[in-house]
Amino acid sequence: MDVMLIALIVAIIEGVTEFLPVSSTGHMIIAGNLLGFTGSLADVFDIFIQLGAILSVIFLYKEKFRRFFTSAGWRADKGLSAWHVLAGIVPVMGIAFFAHSAIKQYLFSPFTVAIGLFLGAFLLLYAEKKTENMEEYLLDDVDKITLRQAALVGAFQILSLWPGFSRSGSTIGGGLLIGLTRRAAAEYSFIVAVPLMFAACLYDLLKNISELSVGDLYVLALGFVVSFAVAYLSIIWFIGFLNRSRLRNFAYYRIALAFITLWYFYL
């Protein structure tokens, strides 16, 4: 298959799944194995399309990000602040720094992804069940989140270091369990994803950039643009979905995908 077509497919998958609770990393690993898209170009391509997805969040929530660079953005009593973001990313960044190599070496396979898909699905189902009929008691505004809630969501985010578990799934499921609505948890998840993903992408990019050639730039540019556009639309759709529906369908999809993955690769 032509490399540009593969790049288009993988970028669309990244854009659709990055901020949904279905694990973009899991989908990328599965798609890469199915399409035979591996090696140094694939590694750097995955980084570039994640950067495109990150840009879509910055574009959608530009007012909040602009505020973080003002003195008011560091006032924890004046809405969502940089302190809330730090509280949500420091735990997972600390563990990821030391465990990064081991995760890449031992957990990036269809089998481990299937396990993560199962476990993340059960977290979503449990969170939905635990908070059923409690909507009126949940915090529905991301600007009202406390530092304690931010830190607890960050602790749940550690689960996403296992490929297939899903960063979005772990933070939204965890957010529900600590008293946030689906929408508030999702918006907080989107915002804290930006510095977290940027740091991870920059780290991986510095390790792999020397493997590229000038001819690879066209593939990377295509992936970046497509992932940005698709992720932008995906976030808008997902926020609308959360206003009218629950997360159970995503959990059922994850379970089905896990079974299909195990069947295709191992049976």
Image (tube, grey):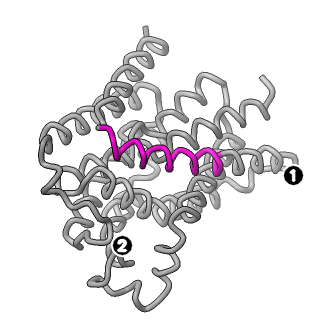
Q: Position of residue 109 (x, y in %)?
A: 47, 30
Neighbourhood count class around disc 1 (C-alpha, 10 Å): few under 14, some 14–19, many 20 upward: few
Q: Quadrant of residue 180?
A: bottom left
Q: Quadrant of residue 189?
A: bottom left
Magenta residue span: 227-245
Q: Position of residue 248 (x, y in %)?
A: 28, 32
Q: Is residue 96 magenta?
A: no
Depth check, front residue: 23 or 238: 238
Q: Main secondary structure of the magenta part?
A: helix
Q: Position of residue 116 (x, y in %)?
A: 34, 34
As drawn, the label of residue 214 is 1
At horizontal 76% and vertical 45% (from top left) the residue drawn is 222
Q: Is residue 138 left or right of residue 242?
A: left
Q: Amino acid at mark 2?
A: Leu
User: Do residues under tags 2 and 1 come within 8 Å of each other at their CB atoms?
Assistant: no
Q: Nearer the viewer, mark 2 or mark 1?
A: 2
Q: Quadrant of the N terminus?
A: top right
Q: Is residue 236 magenta?
A: yes
Q: Position of residue 226 (x, y in %)?
A: 69, 45
Depth check, front residue: 92 or 140: 140
